[in-house]
Amino acid sequence: MKALSDGRLLAAASFVRPGAVFADIGTDHAYLPLHLLQQGRITRAIAADIGEGPLSRARAHIAASGMAGRVETVLTNGLQGLEHHGLTDIAICGMGGELIVDILSASPFVREAGIRLILQPMTRAATLRRYLASEGFAILAERPCRAAGRVYTCLCVEHDGVRRTLTPAEAEVGRPLCESEEERDCFAELLARRITALQEKKRALEGASLTDEEDEALLAALLSLQQA
Ligand SMILES: C[S@@+](CC[C@H](N)C(=O)[O-])C[C@H]1O[C@@H](n2cnc3c(N)ncnc32)[C@H](O)[C@@H]1O
């Protein structure tokens, strides 16, 4: 099996606890559970997907890896039917933030003590962060990451019941761990991308003699983060 090179999935793998009862939701090719098994980080996994096509891709990769006895494939929507599998660590990667919110909302068992969620939104990370904060999930850590030349983020989350209010800047870009040069570069790029988008919007509004005070405040907060 080829070594995993996708920075998103490597960031997700870094948050999985050794010995976890692990499920990968929206597994597609099953690269993440196979990587974790190969690393000896976990001994068994569930690879779940809503699509028969992605799941057959997963089955083919699992068979080729020689780990067929250690990965159970499940055709399901989100976490439906996985309530009683004793899961401890659940990854939902490579989906939009809104879809991740829908999946979490439909499965209240993700709030049980001892369950860790590893969430990697492709879009709408701010929507996801706001949902987590308002629903009593603690963002324990967040890693900026890169895949196919684009930057993303990966969140490590557990429910503690404490409802939090995020500042607009915290919702937009999080408070990531930037432990390596690569993570610092990724975060700088995420920040710069958001700042550019807000500056472009500001210029367009100015052209129509309008202002958006919330965006102005967010832009100022992100610019000061950039200079910190
Ligand atoms: C872009 S792929 C991501 C694959 C892998 N997780 C990754 O990050 O590289 C998204 C996968 O999520 C699956 N998916 C979409 N909605 C889902 C849902 N509600 N429940 C389970 N899987 C879903 C799709 O079928 C697809 O295989």
Image (spheres, rainbow, N blue to C red):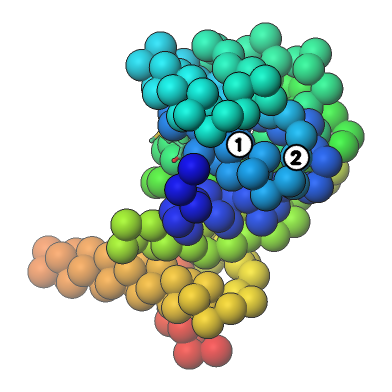
Residue 20 drawn above or below residue 180:
above
Per the image, label 2 sits on a secondary structure element best described as loop
Judging depth in this view, the residue of 48 and 224 nearest the camera is 48
Is residue 116 at all visible to an observer of this figure? yes
Q: Residue at x 60, y 50 (%)?
A: 12
Q: In the picture provided, is 57 more to the left or to the right than 10?
A: left
- Looking at this rendering, what residue extends furthest in the left direction? 207
As measured in the structure, the alpha-carbon distance from the residue carrying label 1 to the one carrying label 2 is: 8 Å
Quarter holding the C terminus is: bottom right
Q: Give residue 75's position: percent from left, percent from top.
A: 52, 11
Q: Which residue is mark 2?
A: 42
Mark 1 and mark 2 in contact? Answer it, CB < 8 Å: yes
Label 1 sits on a secondary structure element that is helix
In the depicted structure, whether residue 217 falls above or below residue 31:
below
**Quarter of the view holding residue 48:** top right
Residue 219: percent from left, percent from top? 40, 73
Q: x, y (%) of residue 70?
A: 69, 25
Residue shown at the point (58%, 29%) measured from the top left: 66
Q: Nearer the viewer, residue 195 or 63?
A: 63
Mark 1 residue's CB less than 8 Å from ligand 1: no
Q: Position of residue 168 (x, y in %)?
A: 53, 61
In this view of the protein, which residue sits in the foreground, 226 or 38? 38
The image quarter containing residue 119 is top right
Residue at 41% x, 46% y: name it: 122
Q: Amino acid at mark 2?
A: Ile
Identify residue type, mark 1: Pro
| Residue receiving disc 1 | 33
Graded by Cα atoms within 10 Å as few (under 14), some (14 to 19) or many (20 or more), the crowding at tag 1 reads many
Kindly identify the residue that appears in the image at 84 percent across and 29 percent down. Answer: 112
Give the crowd class for mark 2: few <14, some 14-19, many >=20 residues within 10 Å: many
Decide if residue 18 is on the left or right side of residue 79. Answer: right
